[in-house]
Image (spheres, rainbow, N blue to C red):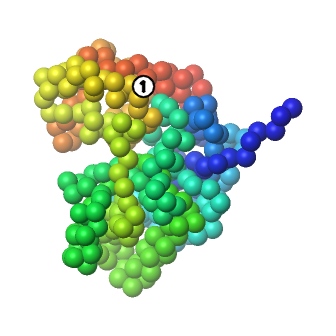
Amino acid sequence: MTAAPPPVWQLVLVLWGTKYPVAEVNHLIDTVCRLASHAPRVVLITDALRDGLRDGVVQRLIPTFFMDPRMRGPGCQTKLCMFEAGVVPEDLPAVFIDIDTVVLGDMAQFLALQNSRKTVAIFQSAILPFGALARALFRLTKGRRYARGNSSIVVYHPAETAHIAARYRALVGELGFNGIRPMIADERFISWSHQPHMRAIPHDMAVKLPTEFMLPWPWLIHLRARLPWVRRRWARLIALTLPGVEVKGETLLTLPDEAEVVDRKGRRLIWSEAALGPVKEQLTAYYTALQQSGKTP
């Protein structure tokens, strides 16, 4: 029997508490490995060792420092443990994804976003884009102004990013929890502390469901979904991240066609092919398979 080739990248997940059962974690890992052109090493950073995980998953405990209850709140600073020296092996580049990410394609393609091992790629989430202008403004304002992103997906190399966790630890020791504004959320701190090497994940590779598919106006949702170049881009997506409690994947399967979900910002998700294009069928297939895997009755 031919031995499997050694991995060239790592899939990194961070898990604490009981929100996500092992069956959901396994379904995500299985999907990534099935669709990847190169199967990854899988590293789960967890608050407690989990039974029943897919064979071969490397489990690493979240360092005690990052288990502070305040860091597991809305700011999710606990996720910064992915950069802690010695937690994720340093021999390969890594792609972190939130567990409520729906994987639709080959995640190994994200590795192409690294211009060098120092590059960190995340979603863009502010008007000021990552790039030369943001870097110049960061220098001129001594770090008061900077481009920032969202950390639902993070492409990075563990050998070049341990300073992010180390600097956060040092600032907590010096200034206390949330001592300066960039410390109020993991994604802000990543963007601020690594600003010279940040870049955005392109929207033709991955998107966040709320920002891509949810708008306050149904007419605009349907108009946008009819644009052929938009539908072609949606058909090529590698990953789609859900917003957690407001839009649950399993709940979508129970909705009738054309049903609407409204989030706290007044944005609407219309559950129909006319509004979501090919993504509706892909979401249905992903969460149907999850149900069949045993997560839900």
At horizontal 49% and vertical 26% (from top left) the residue drawn is 286
Image quarter hosting the N terminus: top right
Disc 1 element: helix
- Residue that carries the numbered disc 1 in the rendered image: 283
Please state which of residues 197 and 41 is positioned toward the viewer in this rendering.
197
At horizontal 25% and vertical 78% (from top left) the residue drawn is 142
Residue at the right extreme of this rendering: 1
Q: Quadrant of residue 272?
A: top left
At horizontal 21% and vertical 76% (from top left) the residue drawn is 141
Q: Amino acid at mark 1?
A: Leu
Please state which of residues 78 and 214 is positioned toward the viewer in this rendering.
214
78 left or right, relative to 228: right
Please state which of residues 287 and 97 is positioned toward the viewer in this rendering.
97
Residue at the bottom extreme of this rendering: 174
In percent of width and height, residue 236 lies at 41, 29
Q: Quadrant of residue 284?
A: top left
In percent of width and height, residue 181 lies at 27, 71
In percent of width and height, residue 143 lies at 27, 74
Q: How busy is the neighbourhood of tag 1: few (under 14 within 10 Å), some, or many (20 plus)?
A: many
At horizontal 81% and vertical 38% (from top left) the residue drawn is 3
Residue at the top extreme of this rendering: 257
In the depicted structure, whether residue 149 falls above or below residue 168: above
Asked whether residue 27 appears in the rendered view, the answer is no
268 left or right, relative to 117: left
Please state which of residues 242 and 261 is positioned toward the viewer in this rendering.
242
Image quarter hosting the C terminus: top right
In percent of width and height, residue 247 lies at 33, 34
